[in-house]
Structures are given as structure tokens and as C-alpha cells.
């Protein structure tokens, strides 16, 4: 079967450098027999990244970059170099963009949410396919009187409705401020929403927030070709280490629109108690609350240059070959009675999608097996997947067909019921899908192991599986 895969995907052979690296830099995966397929959850770091970072820390003395002494100046130089490296990685001109360091992509999104000048008459539009860290911005928007509009997505492909998008983008010509947010790649379905939307929306006066957290690890984001106003990133998703650092890339021309509702240490040049005044720092520092995770920033530069040494296009080629293999094999898996084993949620081919696949397993009678059960059984085989809605409730609702009425019934008199009563109402709506996401260290053997695992469900009945039914639990309420 591997031969057939290699024959059908000649481009895969060009990525053999990643097989070498799997042996030298990611050997711990095989030493422990792990099949890691949760790259959209978090990337896996190469050993050399950690070694290089530790070597730097072990040989240098670094101080808080907010001071002006020798050790802080040394650190500050690294901080600024890392900013420049991030701009270079995304081919963003320093004349056009600046980089604000944050704890993660969510921290970047929160900056936009709390500082965007939402108010009466302004609009926040977003796709139903969005991470909760983007959905949550609607609460800032609503509280300040802005209108919130969702662009629906449609099963089975889970892409946005073009007409609805066009209508919404055209609907607020005179709004004083309007922000449109969408993910370049869905963390649920792997759908890649078109980057052309950025120019379309901006031409109609929208500021555009591109959530690139799930896209950046395996796709080239070239900010000389597209010009979103805001882009959020979590670095651990690209190269695994360090966690705790993300960034917001902001167009310099849009930055003055952001009105920071408070200030903190590190964000001001001057503040006084006597007259209760303050003066914000110019540039990115105004949005970096407190002390940045400075000792980790050199590890970001190390990670970026590691990815550059491989080439993001090579990584993309490899993950898409492997995704194509799964997209061919999985729908072909049938029980003896002809019923499909798996239902995919999202595009059935590699066109306009990334290497994140969402699915559920069905037993021989066509009953859906609880995704948490499948996840648990995979873990027993040392296969790391992720079950649930992955913080993307809109995609789950469209994929599984939960209607607005269903969900409204759950929230009826929500203030008057206990959390336990709410849990009982919402049971069944908290299930989701089983996500498999491919990354730079994934190899042919990993995908073969996953396919072998999937085949073990052929001709099984849900009654043979411990806690196979969906009513089994309310496992993932918030996420
Ligand atoms: C598309 C997308 N946006 C935002 C986030 C939030 O990232 P973080 O949890 O690192 O803040 C994630 C995390 O999975 C994501 O996949």
C-alpha cells in the first residue's frame, strides 16, 4: 500500500529531508511508539531548537528588557531581532507591518477585540467557522453597541456561502468602523477560506482580521501579497517550542485606530498619579502588557530559522500528499454490508483545504460512535488525535446539523437553572468530531498506523464498544 501511495504522490519523495529529520530531531516520537496527529493542537519541536536555546541561555546573562542596563540592552537586542525575524518569515515589509508579542494567538485577538473602536453603527462580521478566541470578540463588539453578523457555512464542505458573504460585506457602506474576521484555515475542517477576501473586504472599507493560527504551520503566508490589517499567530503551533509566545501583526496604517482601554507596566512612556494621566509608548510596546516572555523570544527566532532551513513550501507539499492519501483511503473504508465507516466533515479533496481532517466513525448499523470514545481508543494505541469541537462551535453546529432551535432550547431561561440542569440539557450537543492534523514530522508510517487503527472498527457494532454511544457524557463543555 505504501508503494501505491508513493507512486500516486511522486512529490512526496522530494520531502525526504523530513524523513531524515524525523530520525535525527524527532526520534523521541518513534522511541516511544507515538503517532502524533494533533499538530493543529500544537506543533512538535525539533531537539536542536531546545539545544540551541538552552545553549544561549546557559552562556549569556539577560535582564528584563525594560531596564537600560547592560544585560537588559543585550536582551532588548534579541527582542528586536526576533521582531525583524517574524516580519521576514511572513515577508511583511517593516514599512507596512509591526509585530506585537503576545502570550498566544488568543492574546493577539484580545488586543484587537478590546481596542478596536466598536460603537453604535459599527459592525463586526465573522464567519461561522471561527475559533472561540475570535467568536469571543463579538462580546466586546456587542457591549459597545456594534452589530454582529455571522457569515454562514454550509455542510458538507463547510465553506462560507459566497452570496451571504458578499451581502454582508456590502451591507454597511457607511459604518464608521467595520471589522471582518475569518480563519485562513479552519482548525475544525481544514477548509482554507480564500485569501482574496482580504482585498475584497478592504476595498469595501472593512478592516480585516486574518486568524492565521492554524494556517501558518504548513502554508506560506506572504504579507507582500495579501494585506490583512491584523494577523494572529501562536508560535508553538508552527514549531512546537516555545509555548507562551504569539504575536499580532498589525498594519501600521491601521494601528492608530486601536484605542487601548487601559495601560500597564511597559506600555507607557510616562504616567502620573497626581493628575491621573499617562502617555502610551509608541509602536508595539503600547500593547505588550507587562514584561514580554523575553527569555523565550530567542527560541522564536531559532524556531523560525529552523522552519526556513526546511522550507515552508516543502512542509506544505509533504502534509498535502499525506492528506490526499487519507482523503482517498478513508471514504473507501466500508463495512461488509457496504455502509461507510467514516464520515468526513469538510472538503473531500485537497482543493482549498489544509491537512486537518475532521471525521466521525460509524458502526456497521450506521450509528455514530462517540468521538471521545474513538479518541480514547486511539490513545490506547499511542495515537494522539483530538475529539470535540476544538473551540469552533460554529463548524460543529454546521457539520453535525445542530439547529438554532435546538440550541435556543438549551439556553431557555439559562439564568434560572443550575449548571447541572444546563449540562443535562446540552448533553448530545457537546459531542463533535475526531480531528486528525498532519504536521512537519508526520511520516508514511504514522498515516499507515492511523488507517490500520480505523480498520479495526470495520464490522463492529457500537454495543461492543465501551461508552460508544454519544449520550456517554458531557466531556468537553467549553472547548
Ligand atoms: C484557528 C485558531 N485560532 C486561534 C487559536 C487559539 O490559539 P491559542 O490557544 O494558542 O491562543 C487556535 C488554537 O487552536 C486556532 O486553531
Image: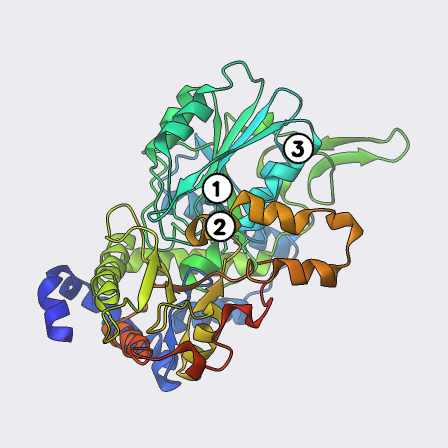
Visible residue check, residue 77: no
Image point (25%, 75%), residue name: 448
Neighbor class of circle 2 (other Cα within 10 Å; few <14, some 14-19, many 20+) is many
| Residue under the point 74% across and 37% down | 262
- Identify the residue position indicated by label 3 in the image: 142
The residue that appears at 12% across and 68% down in the rendered structure is 6
Is residue 241 rendered to the left or right of residue 415?
left
Asked whether disc 1 touches disc 2, contact meaning CB atoms under 8 Å apart, the reply is yes
Relative to 241, residue 353 above or below? above
Looking at the image, which residue is at 20% across and 64% down? Answer: 15
Which comes before the other along the chain, label 1 or label 2? 1
Residue situated in front as seen by the camera: 64 or 31: 31
Q: Secondary structure at mark 2?
A: helix
* Mark 3 Cα-neighbour bin, 10 Å: few <14, some 14–19, many ≥20: some
**Residue position marked by numbered label 2 in the rendering:** 397
Residue 298 location, x and y as percent?
Answer: 49, 58
The disc at residue 128 is 1
Amino acid at each position: 500500500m505504501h508503494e501505491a501511495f508513493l507512486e500516486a504522490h511522486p512529490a512526496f519523495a522530494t520531502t525526504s529531508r523530513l524523513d531524515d529529520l524525523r530520525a535525527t530531531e524527532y526520534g523521541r516520537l518513534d522511541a516511544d511508539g507515538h503517532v502524533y496527529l494533533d499538530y493543529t493542537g500544537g506543533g512538535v519541536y525539533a531537539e536542536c531548537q531546545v539545544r540551541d536555546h538552552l545553549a544561549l541561555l546557559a552562556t549569556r546573562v539577560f535582564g528584563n528588557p525594560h531596564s537600560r542596563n547592560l544585560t537588559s540592552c543585550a536582551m532588548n537586542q534579541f527582542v528586536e531581532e526576533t521582531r525583524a525575524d517574524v516580519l521576514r518569515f511572513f515577508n511583511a515589509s517593516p514599512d507596512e507591518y509591526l509585530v506585537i508579542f503576545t502570550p498566544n494567538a488568543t492574546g493577539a485577538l484580545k488586543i484587537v477585540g478590546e481596542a478596536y473602536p466598536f460603537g453604535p453603527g459599527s459592525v463586526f462580521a465573522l464567519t461561522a467557522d471561527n475559533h472561540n478566541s475570535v467568536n469571543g470578540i463579538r462580546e466586546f463588539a456587542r457591549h459597545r453597541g456594534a452589530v454582529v453578523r455571522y457569515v454562514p457555512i454550509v455542510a458538507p464542505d463547510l465553506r462560507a456561502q459566497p452570496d451571504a458573504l458578499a451581502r454582508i460585506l456590502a451591507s454597511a457602506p457607511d459604518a464608521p468602523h467595520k471589522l471582518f474576521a475569518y480563519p485562513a484555515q479552519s482548525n475544525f475542517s481544514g477548509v482554507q477560506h480564500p485569501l482574496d477576501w482580504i482585498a475584497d473586504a478592504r476595498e469595501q472599507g472593512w478592516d480585516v482580521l486574518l486568524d492565521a493560527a492554524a494556517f501558518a504551520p504548513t502554508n506560506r503566508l506572504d504579507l507582500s501579497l495579501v494585506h490583512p490589517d491584523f494577523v494572529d499567530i501562536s508560535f508553538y503551533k508552527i514549531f512546537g517550542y516555545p509555548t507562551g509566545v504569539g504575536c499580532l501583526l498589525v498594519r501600521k496604517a491601521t494601528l492608530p485606530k486601536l484605542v487601548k482601554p487601559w495601560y500597564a507596566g511597559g506600555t507607557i512612556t510616562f504616567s502620573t498619579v497626581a493628575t491621573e494621566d499617562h502617555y502610551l509608548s509608541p509602536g508595539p510596546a503600547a500593547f505588550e502588557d507587562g514584561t514580554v516572555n523575553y527569555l523565550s523570544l530567542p527560541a522564536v527566532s531559532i524556531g523560525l530559522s529552523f522552519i526556513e532551513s526546511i522550507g515552508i513550501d516543502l512542509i506544505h507539499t509533504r502534509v498535502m500528499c499525506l492528506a490526499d492519501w487519507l482523503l482517498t483511503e478513508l471514504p473507501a473504508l466500508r463495512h461488509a454490508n457496504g455502509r461507510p465507516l467514516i464520515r468526513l466533515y469538510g472538503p473531500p479533496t485537497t482543493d482549498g483545504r489544509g491537512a486537518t481532517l475532521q471525521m466521525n466513525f460509524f458502526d456497521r448499523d450506521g450509528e455514530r460512535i462517540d468521538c471521545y470514545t474513538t479518541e480514547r481508543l486511539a490513545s490506547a494505541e499511542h495515537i494522539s488525535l483530538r475529539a470535540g469541537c476544538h473551540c469552533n462551535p460554529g463548524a460543529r453546529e454546521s457539520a453535525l446539523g445542530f439547529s438554532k432551535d435546538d440550541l435556543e432550547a438549551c439556553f431557555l431561561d439559562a439564568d434560572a437553572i443550575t449548571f447541572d440542569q444546563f449540562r443535562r440539557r446540552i448533553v448530545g450537543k457537546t459531542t463533535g468530531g475526531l480531528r486528525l492534523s498532519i504536521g512537519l514530522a508526520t511520516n508514511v508510517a504514522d498515516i499507515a498506523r492511523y488507517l490500520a487503527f480505523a480498520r479495526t472498527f470495520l464490522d463492529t457494532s457500537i454495543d461492543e464498544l465501551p461508552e460508544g454511544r454519544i449520550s456517554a457524557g458531557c466531556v468537553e463543555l467549553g472547548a
